[in-house]
Image: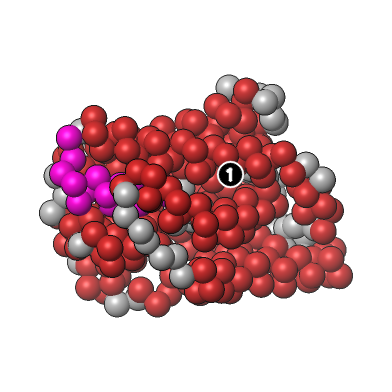
Amino acid sequence: MGPMKKFAIGATALLPLWALLAAGAAYVHPAPWAARGGWIVPLLGLVMFGMGLTLTWEDFRRVFRRPALILLGLAAQFGFMPLLAFGIARLFGLPTELLAGLVLVGCVSGGTASNVITYLARGDVALSIAMTFCSTVLAVVATPALVWLYLHQTVHVAAGAMLLSILKMVLLPVLAGLAINQFWGGHLRRLQPLFPLFSVAAIALIIGIVFGLNRDKVAATTPWLAGAVALHNLLGMASGYAAARVFRCSPAVCRTLAIEVGMQNSGLATALAVKYFGAAAALPGALFSIWHNLSGSACAAWWSRRGRTAETEP
């Protein structure tokens, strides 16, 4: 193993530390981080491009030859996450607006950061991208239906804007990287150990920026709400992993479903909360934005370390 690869592995394993350092710096000095809010989309796009450089057309053909995996992930995401949100909010006795905000987090599609976390966790990146796209398409119908079921409130999801953001942040960068890998992949092998390093740096920066943008909301968070948000995310990841294990999926697929189910499009949930339920309802989504990146980073570091030694984790 070359020194570059050793360094990349060590830095990736320390992702939770970098994430906490960025979050801490943003909490103490939020203004410089919040001012870079416009960096989030380009950073995600660049990381997705780098991930595309590690993929081939065969990776996607393999995923779509097994549509049952995508259906399993979608069923777990839109089945478990809203139910968990509603149950946890009731259990914690959250007031109506916060209950609505947490349920909205459970009713939306998967978040684009899940693709990066899957890559760092040595999961199935092609499956992760396919699931993010399919859940985004399905959310156009599923999110309003689930919100009505749990909250008896009609909401409108801006389908065009949501799909356009997925196209710009995920599909186009991945396809560009994939095309380059297809024709010039042999020249990129020396640089591939650097891709996880760039992803780690990007995720740490994104966490810091999200923390800076939501610093006041974090300061106003009660322990009960923080606990409810964390439990929602962790139980979501556990349910996704368990669903994949029940169907005897590979460890890489189990990790992917855990991440896809547990990490939500909290930005969409926050926007819908403000529009339909009031400012207080946006708190769960804002807090989820921070927490799921921290928990996802910790899981990615753990699974990445285990995946290098064995592919048999429970």
Quarter-wise, where is residue 86 in the image? top left
**Residue 191 seen by the camera:** no
Q: Main secondary structure of the magenta part?
A: helix
Residue 82 drawn at (x, y percent): 40, 41
Residue 200 drawn at (x, y percent): 50, 56
Front position in the image: 165 or 193: 165
Residue at x 22% of width, y 73% of height: 31
Span shown in magenta? 93-107
Q: Is residue 279 left or right of residue 5?
A: left
**Does 101 appear in magenta?**
yes
Secondary structure, mark 1, is helix
Write down the residue under mark 1. 74
Front position in the image: 260 or 174: 260
**Amino acid type at image mark 1:** Leu
**Residue 68 seen by the camera:** yes
Relative to 93, does residue 24 appear above or below in the rendering?
below
Residue 182 drawn at (x, y percent): 84, 66
Q: Which quadrant holds the C terminus? A: top right
Residue at x 39% of width, y 45% of height: 149
Which color scheme does this rendered protein use?
Answer: secondary structure
Residue at x 24% of width, y 45% of height: 99
**Circle 1 residues within 10 Å: few <14, some 14–19, many ≥20:** many
Q: Which quadrant holds the N terminus? A: top right
Residue at x 60% of width, y 66% of height: 170
Residue 97 drawn at (x, y percent): 20, 51
Q: Is residue 2 left or right of residue 136?
A: right
